[in-house]
Amino acid sequence: MSIPVSTATDEWIAAEVLRDEFTHEQSLLDAEETPADEDKAEATVDLAARFLGFVSGRVHDDPQSIHARTSLLLNVFKHFTLSYLSEKDVHSLVAQYDKDVRKAVLSSYIQALAVLQSQKVTDIPTGPQSALLSDATSGVASIFAIFGGQGTNEVYFDELQSLYDIYKPFVAPFIATVTKDVLIPLAAKQQSTSYFTYGLDVISWLSGASPRPPLAYLATVPVSFPVIGLTQLVQYLVTARVAGLTPGELRERISGTTGHSQGIVSAVAIAASTTFESFTENVRKALKWLFFSGLRGQQAFPVVSLDPSIIQDSIDGGEGTPSPMLSVTGLVLKNLEPYVKKTNAHLPENSKLHVSLHNGPRAFVVTGPSRALYGLVTALRKVRAASGLDQSKIPFSQRKPVFSVRFLVVGVPYHNREYLEGETEKVLTEDLGGEELWKAEDLLIPVYNTEDGVLFSRYRFITDEDTQFPFLGSDLRSLSSSITRSLCDQIFTKPIHWSAATNFPATATHAIDFGPGGLSGIGLLTSRNLDGRGVRVIVIGERGKGDAELYDAQKVNYEEWWSKKWGPALIRTRSVSFIFYSLLFTHSMSLAAME
């Protein structure tokens, strides 16, 4: 590998010293034999990125040669950009690389870029810009942002750790600030409870200054609520920094936003942000709200122990450890509700079950006491087809329904008025002291309520210009009362109608899922709901693998709107003046029928 450098004495000396140190360090790392099947192109990029990271990490080692080493770093960065990033972004470059190599290349590149920026270097080369964000700027694309909620409690911290490791210069100061200002003080005030035995020193867990708490602790609602919010907002910050935009400039390229369950507050935070400073302030507000909403929810619905035989039977049955939220996928609502009603007939008034989350036409979450939900599970087992059962030779009318049932790792039955009534007032008055976190005029893009807009008469009903496709989501900017109260109601007592919340206008072309959960998060579910609607869902983050598509400088992938492509049309031929009724099939077969 050959890199041109300046012949100025101090810069040449710095280059020779760092080259020799790097060669020695690499010889130790390469002592093990290189795998025979290693991709040579990938190995070359990896080596160049290692040197880039090596130089950037030693710029400040010798105070007398900081300028010379910065100049060397700039030359190495220019070489890397010219050699590998003339036509593609670094995320596209490493998209197909080995996971460890991808992480190493990205972290080295980001570290070098951050050092050059901190040294006030003015002629830093940049790779090509995102074609999708450029299309959004010109109005060709219309992007909507979505944020997930609970249900990813066992994986979210790994995502945050990955973001920290790769984009540390961009996110570490931010995470340190909100941890010190919000999370640590709030957790410290709750030491009399058993919910925060390890505190909430997130920045220390990420940096390794303190051991990461056990997974069981991170998965609890009081802890996961604020830290999941932090994870997705860090992902938004990373997107802005990688694209070379402020949070407000990124928001200007987004047509609207919403969030599933607790994700709605992250949507509000980005909608209100302009500068990096205002973004940090909005995240402070969001984390405060998330902390108290998680805490109050758990206090209202304490964790109770179950008979070990029930737990084991549920695990053996494939439904997982019983919890207050049960996901049922594959049944339509009219077929699920009779079983819920039948189960409720055997339950006392204080243990009733409710279908609280309507995630799609065949995706629902039933909430209530875990023991009562276990009763529903046993009823559903009797009618569900066994996994892998071949019913091809059974008449369709006699086949058992195929659906899945799974307990979510969530310890509170959110979106259920029966169990969380009154928690809104506690958060508003006792925890926030009547503070209104956001006003309607603070929201600079539409933020769509997670409940069916038709049910909210106090909201303005929004209809798309194309009246064939009414948009049912209600915009929080039209709310005349408290936005903070609306957020509390949406999480504690109001059901979710996700199809309505994401029934974006006909102009929508893309939705970006900011996590968490990757392909197990809200993005894949949203994609299924929007299938055929001309909206492409991009799931970003390491678990989503959508970064390369988001930052791709060469092309933008668009989805087809099936009704427009395959729907009927009226045509007039040149030879006759008649109007013909045509379908794509009949047109292609030259069999158009006269109307």
Image (tube, rainbow, N blue to C red):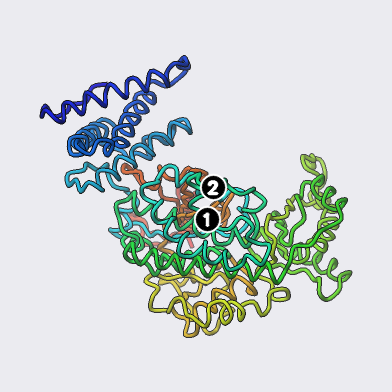
Estimate the x, y position of residue 369 in percent, counting from the top left. Answer: 78, 65
The residue shown at (32%, 20%) is 23
Read off the residue under disc 1: 201
Gap in angstroms between the C-alphas marked 2 and 1: 8 Å
Looking at the rendered structure, the secondary structure element under dot 2 is loop
Vertical placement of 109 versus 335: above or below? above
Quadrant position of the N terminus in the picture: top left
Pointer 2 with pointer 1, Cβ within 8 A: yes
Horizontal arrangement in the rendering, residue 593 relative to residue 390 (left or right): left
Horizontal arrangement in the rendering, residue 409 relative to residue 38 (left or right): right
The residue shown at (52%, 44%) is 543
Task: In this rendered view, identify the residue nearer to me: 23 or 141.
Answer: 23
Vertical placement of 441 versus 146: above or below? below
Extreme left residue here? 8
Read off the residue under disc 2: 210
Number of on-image labels: 2
Vertical placement of 158 versus 254: above or below? above
The residue shown at (57%, 57%) is 529
Task: In this rendered view, identify the residue nearer to me: 24 or 40.
Answer: 24
Horizontal arrangement in the rendering, residue 239 relative to residue 352 (left or right): left
On residue 64, the disc is none
Task: Say whether residue 502 is visible.
Answer: no
Q: Mark 1: which amino acid? A: Asp
Estimate the x, y position of residue 550 in percent, counting from the top left. Answer: 39, 48
- Mark 2 crowd level (few <14, some 14–19, many ≥20, 10 Å Cα): few
- Mark 1 crowd level (few <14, some 14–19, many ≥20, 10 Å Cα): some
- Say which quarter of the image contains residue 411: bottom right
Looking at the rendered structure, the secondary structure element under dot 1 is loop
